[in-house]
Amino acid sequence: MNVTLADLLPLSLDLALCAGILLTFLADLFSGPKPNRAIGVIAVATFAGALIASFQMDLSGSAFGGVYVGDHWTLFFKRAFLAAGLLTTLGSMDHVARRQPHRQGEYYLLLMCSVLGMTLLPGARDLVLLIVAFELMGLPLFVLAAFAKTEDPKGVGKDGPEAALKLYLVGAVSAAITLFGMSFVYGMTGATRIEAIAQAPVTPLFVLGVMLVLAGMAFKIGVVPFHMWVPDTYQGAPTPFVAFLSVAPKLAGFAALATLFHHGFDQVRSEWQPLLFGLSLVSMVLGNLLAVVQTNVKRMLAYSGIGHIGYMLMAFISGAGGTTMLLFYFVAYLVTNIGAFQVVEAVERETGDASLGAFAGMWKRSPLLAFAMLIFLLSLAGIPFVVGFWAKLYVFIVAWHSGLYLLVILGAVLAVVGLFYYMQIARSMYMLAPAREGTFRAPPTLLVSVLLCLAAVVAIGAWPAAVLDDAGKATQPFVSARTATLK
């Protein structure tokens, strides 16, 4: 196949990211044995430059005969992934320079390669490209989860090998199950193009393949009962990386789910929709109830994230309107959860601990970080009028109109449960005496990441229409393509 300029235009941001990866590699290669913090600056500049360019460039069109499609749906996800990469890199710079000064280039290369896989994923319209992008995203995550394995084997890095091993095993099993399911789909349809799969007749083996793909994807996004890796990986992996792991791969997983199940597998919706209904229900229930008994804040946020995946699945099965609200929910969750984990990193950096006790009296030691954490917690709980409130409200509204009354009622009740355990952290910060005296400050780059997240949570909460309209524009071509495929 001849590659033309028209093929490359929709991939401009991805190519820019490739150029940044190459530049990062060269900077690491020629920096010698001395630690070089400038490598992190290159990663920040790459993410920031690509994110700014995404608002200035027209990336619409198809590439390689329709295998890849660039439209507003794809662009929305690219911006989210680039923002996650930017915020994570800012939050990681001090951590990596302090703990792994001679491996900074390796860290940023892995992170950027993972983001590259994510940016390719939402535009994939072929099973082969989709699974390649998914694995390009996933393989660097296994290494990043184990990044702390050689540092202080009795300290904060002691759980690094366990965190990476569980993530790797689950990732490998989920990839195997997904590929096994796709082999059935291909065998029954003779096609890897998603629009061709949507036109194929339904057979029992095709349905079996769809169910296996669903199981593999469920492992990726960490829904109950495929969630076993989540709390242990979150607790053992480096906290700045966990901030990224908790949002970006899940967003990528939902992008793949939407492409496959709303386009390619829509003809068997009656088979998979009840299963997603059940997964949404049990994820909300177990995620929120298990978070109540946690004393480690990273584990608490891990179980909280499982509960949030339940809310997202509620939006996912609510039709076209639900897809719009799903995108809005993810923007809200991205800036809120990354911000919360960055504050945890600041506390862990100061105390060497991420338990509730480490947050005791935080308002005295770091008023700004305590206030930021309080806003993030209120957003996660869905309290008016920060962005998390609108995210939950919009999902409840669209799910109610779709007839998902049980999920809406249960979700509202569990939101109260969520408020209880989130306020345990707030209680520790504002009502308990600090374990040690003196103030502490976050490193400048980490503080910038926290403040950017805080500004986004407050600004979108005050004016949600801008992001909601953009999510609607992103959903429109995706829904139109789905309608055209089903005709």
Image: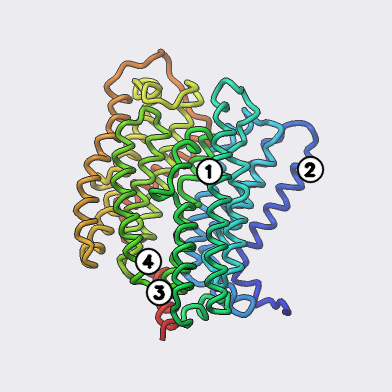
The three-letter code of the residue at mark 4 reads Trp
State the mark number for residue 266. Answer: 3
State the mark number for residue 29. Answer: 2
Q: Which residue is mark 1?
A: 88
Q: How many marks?
A: 4
Circle 1/circle 4 CB separation < 8 Å: no
Q: Position of residue 181 (x, y in %)?
A: 52, 65
Give the mark, 3 or 4, whose residue is nearer the N terminus. Answer: 3
Give the mark, 1 or 2, whose residue is nearer the N terminus. Answer: 2
Give the mark, 1 or 3, whose residue is nearer the N terminus. Answer: 1
- Determine the secondary structure under disc 2: helix
Q: Position of residue 151 (x, y in %)?
A: 63, 26
Circle 3/circle 4 CB separation < 8 Å: no
Q: Is residue 201 shown above or below 98? A: below
- Determine the secondary structure under disc 3: helix
Q: What is the distance, in whole Å, between disc 2 and disc 4 at their CAs?
A: 48 Å
Image position of 408 (left or right of 365): left
Q: Position of residue 226 (x, y in %)?
A: 43, 49
The three-letter code of the residue at mark 2 reads Leu
Q: Which residue is mark 4?
A: 272
The image quadrant where one finds the N terminus is bottom right
The three-letter code of the residue at mark 3 reads Asp
